[in-house]
Amino acid sequence: MIKIQIIYKVIIIISIVILFFIAFYNGLVVRKYSLKTNKILKDQSIRIVLITDLHSQKYGEKQDKIREKIEAENPDIIALAGDIVDDSGRIEGVKLFIEAIKDIAPIYYVTGNHEIRTGEVDKIKGLFRSLGVNVLENSLQKVNVRGVDLIVAGVDDPNIVGYKSPGSNWYKEVYTSFSNMKDMGGYKILLSHRPEKVD
């Protein structure tokens, strides 16, 4: 009877440790997707690295682990789709991250809910801009990558409404910002931390 109680306690402790590890594991996950479109010729290809939810983490000294993974993909564009900064406001890892990758490819960034929660989203955007990042705020940029015309568009996280102008209509702002995008030529890419909110 005592042995069974001890075994149960050990199982419970091990289970708690495993759940704790799963909940707080901050490892890098790489997933690869391949898309085909008639807007890009067969002999052309574009490589985009999409990064999200880093939450101010550090991956190796001077962010070398994440830099190596990004470099290995040989991207034409690096897209940062929000929550690069954690709402704790820790910025050191973020600055190291941008400095580590800024020479690999052009970087495009949109906010996530955690950047908004810091209460310092303008300061964060300013830091990104000062490091050469293209910050998209319900805006777009036309770019040409290896002969392919692209439109890279990005929206602020919907939580920006409560931060900047309570009572404003985020959906209307997004619709107005991109109302003529449908008529533009080129392949369109939309960056959003919560794309399910964008129609």
Image: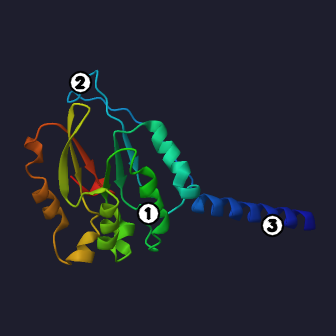
Amino acid type indicated by mark 2: Leu
Residue 3 in view of the camera? yes
Residue at 16%, 69% (x, y): give it.
Answer: 169
Disc marking residue 9: 3
Outermost residue, right side: 2
Ranked by sequence position, the earlier of labels 2 and 3 is 3
Q: Which callout, 2 or 3, points to the residue nearer the camera?
A: 2
Mark 1 secondary-structure assignment: helix
For marks 2 and 1 on the same chain, the one whose residue lies earlier in the sequence: 2
Question: Is the residue 175 above or below the residue 149 in the image?
Answer: below
Res. 95 mark: 1
Residue on which the image places disc 2: 41
The kind of residue on which mark 1 rests is: Lys
Quarter occupied by residue 85: bottom left
Q: Position of residue 26 (x, y in %)?
A: 56, 57
Q: To which quarter of the image does residue 46 belong?
A: top left
Q: Position of residue 125 (x, y in %)?
A: 31, 66
1 left or right, relative to 97: right
Seen from the viewer's position, the closer of residues 75 and 52 is 75
At mark 3, the secondary structure is helix
User: Is residue 115 positioned above or below 60 on the image?
Assistant: below
Q: Residue furthest top?
A: 43
Name the amino acid, label 3. Lys
Q: Is residue 55 visible?
A: no
Q: Is residue 158 above or below residue 145?
A: below
- Measured in 3D between alpha carbons, the distance from the residue under mark 1 to the one under mark 3, in whole angstroms, is 44 Å
Residue beneath the point at 31% across and 56% down: 133
Marks 1, 3: nearer the viewer: 1
Crowding at mark 2 (Cα within 10 Å: few <14, some 14-19, many 20+): few
Q: Nearer the viewer, residue 25 or 133?
A: 133
